[in-house]
Amino acid sequence: MADARLTAFIDRALATGASKAEIQKALEEAGWSRDQISDGLGHYADVSFAVPVPRPKAQLSARDAFLYLLMFGMLYVSAYHLGGLLFQFINLAFPDESLSDVRGYYYSRIRSAVAALIVAFPILLLLASRLAKEIVRDPTRRTSSVRRWLTYLTLLVAACVLTGDLISLIYSLLSGELTVRFLLKVLVVAAIAGAVFGYYLWSLKADEEALGG
């Protein structure tokens, strides 16, 4: 939430006819951060009127919380089991010679991962498509606090996974224990976490551009 003094200043400045660019420059010179300025200016629509016109804010509802929690939950389930599925393919292609008679276990894990993906991934796509259409109809949904919190949480999880993945890779290199199987698994984790991180980072930037931030 923007500082009350900041929004009061922006309200008065817009009322006097100052442009958003002029207000932003003045606030930057006064020491306000770009995020604070963007948040404050985002409260007002780019509409020509006698007084500043506030933007509508999304109303938090139990329905929205349920849909977003379910969607992100299905995202985590899908990402986890996709990684698990690819891991088992790697295990079959490059078996650990120190182990014996584990192919049945690998096939069992493959069936489990496929079953989870058959259920979770379509739900993820359905919810993502439905929520995207609702945002198109009502752009104020971009400001949903549940949506933004879960998006940032997902970015955090993806960043932590990528960091842990890189640490594991460097550790194996330093230990001289790097194998093709291990390297492929590292690449799988990096690809999945990187794709999730990149997509939701792009989503946040798209929201800021759409809201004039």
Image (tube, helix red, strand yellow):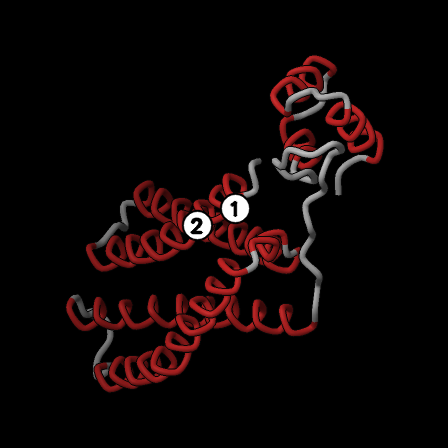
Q: Residue drawn 62% across and 51% down?
A: 143
Q: Nearer the viewer, residue 116 or 4?
A: 4
Where, by quadrant of the figure, is residue 58 drawn? bottom right
Number of on-image labels: 2
Which numbered dot is residue 207?
Answer: 1
Decide if residue 189 is on the left or right side of residue 88.
right
Q: Nearer the viewer, residue 72 or 183?
A: 72
> Which badge, 2 or 1, is on the more N-terminal residue?
2
Decide if residue 196 is on the left or right side of residue 30.
left
The extreme top residue here reads 29
Mark 2 falls on what kind of element? Answer: helix
As drawn, 65 above or below 118? above
Q: Amino acid at mark 2?
A: Phe
Q: Position of residue 148 (x, y in %)?
A: 60, 53
* Residue bearing mark 2: 197
Label 1 packing within 10 angstroms: few (<14), some (14-19), many (20+):
some
